[in-house]
């Protein structure tokens, strides 16, 4: 199939992208951009839960070879790692940039500069897409940067790579702008979400957000090379001791959205940040826990997507304090198509 022109180009031509940027920026005066709805005036740099003011915090801009095959493909994904976060995951592998807001303050960036960095990823590094990582608290700044980048020549698809803890109202402003949504579905229990990520309403918020994402982009569409053009990919990280609620979450995806849903099952959990001090989180997953999730995929008829191989725990760890690239050497992909993995192992 031919490449699909990203929708943000038509939105720019019609003036709708400018309208959305202005509407979102106005909401920063009493911030309700994410589910926290702190109501601080970020235009005046009043800090709420995410410790972020008017400007985006951009912790790293780099080529990323370790995303799902349909995202990274041959030339890699152009990752824009935003700093700070609207969650506090005890096991966050990006904790250096997500949970150290004092240090991240120095990474503030004007939106035109961010636009230039996006063009660098597209033109100089040849990335297949622009991949906004942890963007939930920076949606207005993201839209403004895209608005600046279009007349500079931005033309690749945009990926919204998120924890899933997103505001539906903010996502609606991204309709026809984002080509590929890449959310996590981390928990099926608000008790565990509160205990380990300080997000007591995560389950409802994430499910509402994923439902809205699916309404916007539908099932994954790839080109003749397998590169994602449009659609939803839901990530599910297997946690030890059943803490991710895999059965309930995957059942919800298959039965409430679609069994044709594209999922990315991740076995890469490793105790990071504060997790080693928490007994329930202090180990990697077991073979039995992994095999249980594979069986779930079969039982639910979820056949589209990828499964990381068991033992991937150390393959995807970034170091944002390393000079140069946070992933060095580039992580080797250890995913396998669900259809192949399940038919061989079961």
Image (tube, rainbow, N blue to C red):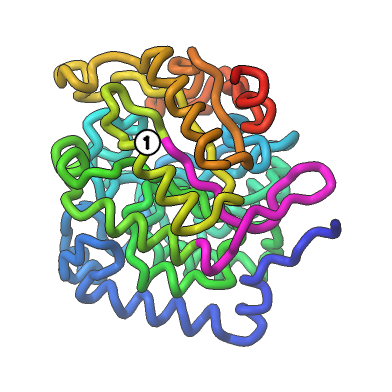
Front in this rendered view, residue 182 or 12 = 182
Q: Quadrant of the C terminus?
A: top right
Residue 102 appears in the picture as rendered: no
| Residue 53 percent coordinates (x, y) | 26, 60
Residue 24 is drawn in which quadrant?
bottom left
Bin the neighbour count of mark 1 within 10 Å (Cα to Cα): few under 14, some 14-19, many 20 and up.
Answer: many
Q: Is residue 91 above or below residue 40?
A: above
Q: Is residue 246 above or below residue 223?
A: above
Hey, which residue is sitting farthest front in the picture? 299
Front in this rendered view, residue 227 or 305 = 305
Q: Which residues are magenta?
A: 214-236
**Residue marked by disc 1:** 246
Is 234 contained in the magenta span?
yes
Q: Is residue 167 above or below residue 331?
A: below
| Residue 165 percent coordinates (x, y) | 32, 54
Residue 195 appears in the picture as rendered: yes
- Name the side, left or right, on which 228 lies relative to 93: right
Q: Is residue 2 above or below residue 235?
A: below
| Residue visible at 56% across and 29% down in the picture | 307
Q: Quadrant of the N terminus?
A: bottom right
| Residue 199 percent coordinates (x, y) | 20, 49
| Residue visible at 25% across and 24% down in the picture | 273
| Residue visible at 15% across and 42% down in the picture | 191
| Residue 301 percent coordinates (x, y) | 57, 41
Is 271 contained in the magenta span?
no
Front in this rendered view, residue 253 or 2 = 253
């Amino acid at each position: 199939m031919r490449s699909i022109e990203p929708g943000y180009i038509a939105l720019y031509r019609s003036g709708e992208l400018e309208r959305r940027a202005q509407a979102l920026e106005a909401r920063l005066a009493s911030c309700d951009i994410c589910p926290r709805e702190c109501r601080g005036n970020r235009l005046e740099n009043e800090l709420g839960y995410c410790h972020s003011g008017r400007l985006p915090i951009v912790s790293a801009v780099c080529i990323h070879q370790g995303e799902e095959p349909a995202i990274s493909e041959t030339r890699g994904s152009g990752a824009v790692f935003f700093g700070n976060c609207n969650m506090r995951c005890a096991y966050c592998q990006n904790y250096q940039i997500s949970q150290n807001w004092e240090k991240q303050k120095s990474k503030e960036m004007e939106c035109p500069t961010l636009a230039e960095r996006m063009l660098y990823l597209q033109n100089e590094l040849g990335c297949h897409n622009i991949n906004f990582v942890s963007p939930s608290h920076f949606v207005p700044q993201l839209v403004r940067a895209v608005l600046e980048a279009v007349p500079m020549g931005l033309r690749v698809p945009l990926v919204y790579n998120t924890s899933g803890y997103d505001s539906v109202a903010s996502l609606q402003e991204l309709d026809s702008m984002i080509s590929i949504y890449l959310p996590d579905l981390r928990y099926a229990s608000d008790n565990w979400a509160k205990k380990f990520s300080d997000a007591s309403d995560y389950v409802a918020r994430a499910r509402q957000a994923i439902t809205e994402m699916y309404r916007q982009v539908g099932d994954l569409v790839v080109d003749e090379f397998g590169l994602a053009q449009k659609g939803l990919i839901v990530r599910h990280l297997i946690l030890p001791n059943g803490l991710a609620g895999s059965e309930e979450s995957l059942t919800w995806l298959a039965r409430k959205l679609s069994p044709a849903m594209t999922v990315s099952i991740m076995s890469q959990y490793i105790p990071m940040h504060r997790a080693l001090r928490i007994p329930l989180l202090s180990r990697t997953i077991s073979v039995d826990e992994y095999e249980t999730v594979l069986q779930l995929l079969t039982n639910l008829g979820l056949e589209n997507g990828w499964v990381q191989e068991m033992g991937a725990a150390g393959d995807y760890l970034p170091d944002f304090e390393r000079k140069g690239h946070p992933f060095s050497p580039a992580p080797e992909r250890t995913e396998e198509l669900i259809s192949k993995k399940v038919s061989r192992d079961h």
